[in-house]
Image: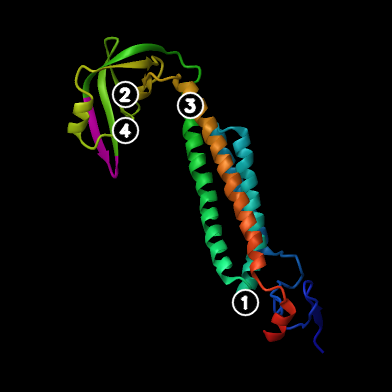
Amino acid sequence: MASTRQCPKCGVVLPETGASTCPACGTYIGTKIGTKTGPAATAKWVIALVQITLSTTFMLVFRFPKFMIAIFAAMIVAGTALSGFVKPKTLAQKSAPQRPLAHPALFKVLGLGIAICALAFVSSLLFGFVSFMNSWTRWHQYEGQRYHRSEFQVTHAYWQRSGKSYSVYASGIVEANREWMSLTPYLHRTPRSQAELDDLVQTGTSIPIYFFPDMKGRARVQVVGDLSPAEQGHRDAMNALNYGLAGLALSGGLLFVMLRLRNFCYQKNESAFGATA
């Protein structure tokens, strides 16, 4: 006689047929309830360890803040653990009979909301991180550098197209030396043609700048603003961090609430469902 098992959720006694889900309620059973071991699980954590090692090495080389390194390591560990939890559930949902819906319209609305919140969560993470790192790099690039105020006398402005983007820069004279500078911070927009750029920045235009004699290239010349380049980079980095974390918290919180609300869209009488399945 075949051995039997009991569903931990609905209590239905199941014959040992090798099925991994309960035919009554769709609960994942498996060979050992709540466990999943083997070469695949080991390989998953080995890959996570490699990802943590590579990302930590990269972030240390480029002087990322330590708390960002810890956040990324925690995200890799959480993602790996979540994948091990979600995969059996996904397989169970595919093989189990579908539970009837009590509120199908609300289920569709919540499904759309979950997709939007998930997209917002990923976007906040990616764009927030990129914005933070750009500002962080600029902050440390100019931090502690020697500089003074001067004037950039434009001799020629250049408009260059690269793929779908544009760049504008100029050559000029600073304290009797030939220098180069980016014109985007000065114009606050990118002209669409060389003619438009020539109208905006004519030969002989004088631009107030911060001059960094110890640096190289266009980084030596920065347009004067309300703050120095280092202070502006620090403020932008903190704003990106604060807004990014706020976006993650808001989208993540809404995502959690909508996932919980979606469970109430199913019919509660699961025993009747099991009898008809």
Few, some or many C-alpha atoms within 10 Å of disc 2 (few <14, some 14-19, many ≥20)? many
**Which numbered disc, 2 or 1, marks the residue closer to the eye?**
1
Q: Which residues are magenta?
A: 157-165
Instruction: Count numbered badges in the picture.
Output: 4
- At x 45%, y 19%, the residue is 228
Local SS, label 3: helix
**Which numbered disc, 3 or 4, marks the residue closer to the eye?**
4
Q: Which residue is mark 3?
A: 233
Residue sticking out furthest to the left: 195
Choose the circle earlier in sequence order: 2 or 1. Answer: 1
Q: Which residue is mark 1?
A: 98
**Amino acid of disc 4:** Arg
Choose the circle earlier in sequence order: 1 or 4. Answer: 1
- At x 48%, y 39%, the residue is 130
Q: Which residue is mark 2?
A: 181
Q: In whole angstroms, how far apart are the C-alphas of marks 2 and 1?
A: 63 Å
Q: Is residue 230 left or right of residue 195?
A: right
